[in-house]
Image: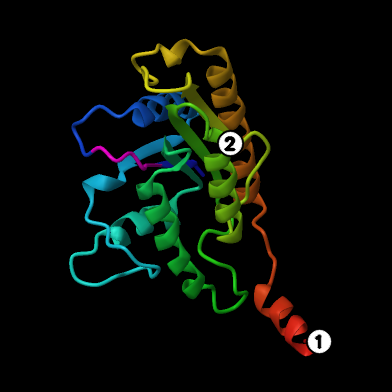
Amino acid sequence: MALKALFLNCTLKKSPSVSNTEALIKKVATLFQLKDVETEIIRVVDYKVHFGVSSDEGEGDEWPKILEKIKTCNILIIGSPIWFGVRGSVTQLVMERLDGTYAEADKLNGQYPLYNRVAGVIVTGNEDGAHNVAAHTLFNLTHLGCTIPPNADCYWVGEAGPGPSYIEAGGDKHLYTNRTARFMVENLTFMADQLQRHPITTNLNMLNQQAEEVS
């Protein structure tokens, strides 16, 4: 079966404003397409996503539309800008909303909806913070059930202080960023294919019962 990669662009800029994060996302998406992986990019701020930690925060909340796409993809990639050295507020909002999937565990084995999906992260911004954003976001995704293969991040950062961002600075020619983009695409595609063929069978319900018996 064909694989699908879903990118959540967590820029703070609504369409059609230029997004440096989306520029790098599109570069990575092209690499996926060369491997016959279907791609879709969602700019989260173009939707009305309410604050909260459930999967549906009521009237007018458009998060359920995005969540449905997350549940049907094989590869989930969070694209985040860096603000004040950490991930942007939209990225944080997305992770908080994904917390709601804990309540949607499979009744038979207890697995969360993001089990058997692989995840990666794309980061852009000035100064430092890429490792911070990638570390926290990938760690969160593992707790939600995602599998993280080696080299699952790709980032570009500019020099210290205000200055040109990814597009203006010619980040598309940056060797390290181009290298990590290819590492990420190769490993995410490989792992997604493996999980499609051999899904994780862990029975969280059984393990939870064992834990209760000794606690």
Number of residues whose C-alpha sits closer than 10 Å to that of mark 2, classed few (under 14), some (14–19) or many (20 or more): some
Above or below, 50 against 210 in this view is above
Quadrant that contains the C terminus: bottom right
Query: Residue 68, percent across and down?
Result: 36, 58
Can you see residue 78?
yes
Query: Residue 99, percent across and down?
Result: 47, 65
Above or below, 162 against 10 in this view is above
Q: Nearer the viewer, residue 200 or 99?
A: 99
Mark 1 sits on what residue?
A: 214
> In this picture, which residue range is highlighted in magenta?
8-13
Give me the C-alpha separation between circle 2 and circle 1. 38 Å
**Magenta span includes 9:** yes
Mark 2 sits on what residue?
A: 131
Please, which residue is most extreme toward the front here? Answer: 161
Label 1 is placed on what type of residue?
Answer: Val
Q: Nearer the viewer, residue 79 or 86?
A: 86
**Magenta span includes 28:** no
Q: Residue at the location (66% across, 41% down)? A: 149
Q: Is residue 197 left or right of residue 34?
A: right
